[in-house]
Image (tube, rainbow, N blue to C red):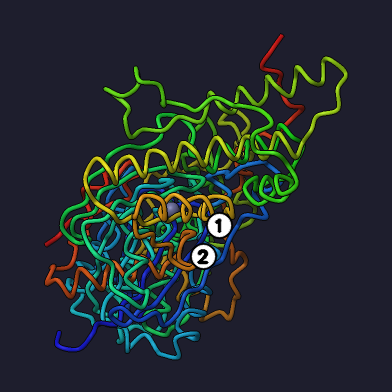
Amino acid sequence: MLLAIDTSAGSSVAVVDGDLVLAENSTEDTMRHAEVIGDMIRQTLDDARVEPRQLDLVVAGMGPGPFTGLRVGIAAARAFALGIGRPVVPAVSHDAVAFDEWSAGVRGAVLVVTDARRREVYWSSYDLTDAGAVRSDGPALCRPDELPYPDFERIDATQIGAGALGRVVRLQRERGEQPEFTEPLYLRSPDVTMPGARKRVTR
Amino acid sequence: MTREPVVLGIETSCDETGVGIVRGRTLLANVIASSMDEHARYGGVVPEVAARAHLEAMNPTIEAALAEAGIGLDAVDAIAVTSGPGLAGALMVGVGAAKALAVATGRPLYAVNHLVGHVGADVLADEPLEYPTIALLVSGGHTSLLVVRDLVGDVELLGETIDDAAGEAFDKVARILGLPYPGGPQIDRVAAGGDPKAIHFPRGLMQPKDDAKHRYDFSFSGLKTAVARWVERAEDAGEEVPVADVAASFREAVVDVLLTKAFRASADFGIPRLLLGGGVVANARVREEAARRAGLAGVSLRIPPLSLCTDNGAMIAALGAQLIMAGHRPSELGFGADSTLPVTEIQVARS
Ligand SMILES: [Zn+2]
């Protein structure tokens, strides 16, 4: 049984047992990750009637996603895992969206797109076959008019479901796949200006 | 809780990831991971760089603190975390981690004020702090003058900087003098051989006309500009800039304003006690001059050990323990990071 946390878009927390989502709570609010995360974890555990120590691992959605909110969920997932002495498993947040499409019966090549703010988008491409959803490219960042794979079916997501993320991670682990990305998928360097020559205050 | 509570404190308001553990008034661990080296190349703290570093340092720092204290998480009775003031994105990392840790361990969570935490650091000293006390908290992020009547119940802000923090002024003047970041220790180093009276730099908000509105406030931006003007004039005249004298004179101006206002508050309020806190207290001249003026004024001066003056988790844990021992209920989990949290809010979201 696992706890999954994702704050790459809104906030979402789920308890997943096998392929079953026992409880899931989500909000699309992209401004209040730090405020909601604690109550959301506690509520989801209560809804699932699960004690923290019954969990075997914690899944952390690593993005891609806007930095400030994304970090709240990763920090929470890692600290929760530390708190129960269980491992944390990093996951690509877009995988949850592709998995939802696959579960709904969609097959073929798809392009998952999420908002990166500042007039940019994050994208990942997937092959959905009867065997499952496999990421073929990405995650990456670009301007909306520069999106690749125009012939793929485009899926714009505003929310990453922690339930789907937990389910897809369970499948990936069953197949013996190791997490491909263990660090936050910021895909953007911090905004910094290197100090140039000192500016004069007198003319 | 009959015995003294063991509290784990998490601090991420600026560029130090701090985790401390106390038992009541006893320090068990104080571990700090700093991202200062990463900011050095930018000449100042870059909020996004700091926040990224907090996320990477958080779990290792918690584990290091537990190891230093020689306890497991099961021995921790409560968790305390800085809710503000500070850099929003940096604070959120600590808040997210602390909430999850509290839910995972089933322990109560206390969301506290960073500035009051600086005052709280002193309860870890051997003798208890007497109240009321004046507190002067000076760092790269804040310059605040407080009157603390009760650590867990009555803290009032007398004044603060209206522009740059004192630590920021040190960084900026170091840059003017071609010295690396962080500026405080650099200025201290080169000022050692300089004459503090060589140049009279302006003292901000010290004129009689400032008294009505800014009696206890600080301003360092004019001082920084004055230093830049002075250096440019010397350079334009083809003179060699007397770096030691400029540094010593600048430092003297900062120290003079800080301490004049602090001792003024002490006299105004009839409170013969002054507590210093914040990273700028590392500055040798600040400590030396504070001790001299305290002796003259008959004020008892408290300066926590340096490792408890700079931002750290132990001070947050210490304040959390004081709240618990005073019977305060934990915080509700819905609080957020508040970058401008007023000092009067000692605990946030009390249930
Ligand atoms: Zn501070």
Compared to residue A120, the image places residue B283 above or below, namely below
Q: Is disc 2 surrounded by few (<14), some (14 to 19) or many (20+) residues within 10 Å? A: some
All told, the count of numbered labels is: 2
Compared to residue A183, the image places residue B101 above or below, namely below
User: At 31% across and 86% down in the image, what residue appears?
Assistant: A53
Horizontal side of residue B266 vs B34, given as left or right? left
- Using the image as rendered, state which of residue A12 and residue B95 is in the foreground: B95
Compared to residue B312, the image places residue B243 above or below, namely above
- Residue A97 appearing in the image: no
- Using the image as rendered, state which of residue A139 and residue B28 is in the foreground: B28
**As shown in the figure, which amino acid type bears the numbered disc 1?**
Ala
Horizontal side of residue B217 vs A70, given as left or right? left
Q: CA distance from mark 1 to mark 2?
A: 6 Å
* Subunit ID for the residue under disc 1: B
User: At 58% across and 71% down in the image, what residue appears?
Assistant: A179
Instruction: Name the residue tied to disc 2.
Output: B306
* Subunit ID for the residue under disc 2: B
Q: To which quarter of the image does residue B103 belong?
A: bottom left
**As shown in the figure, which amino acid type bears the numbered disc 2?**
Leu
Question: Which secondary structure lies at badge 1?
Answer: helix
Q: Quadrant of the C terminus of chain A?
A: top right
- Residue A85 appearing in the image: yes
Question: Which secondary structure lies at badge 2?
Answer: helix
Instruction: Name the residue tied to disc 1.
Output: B282
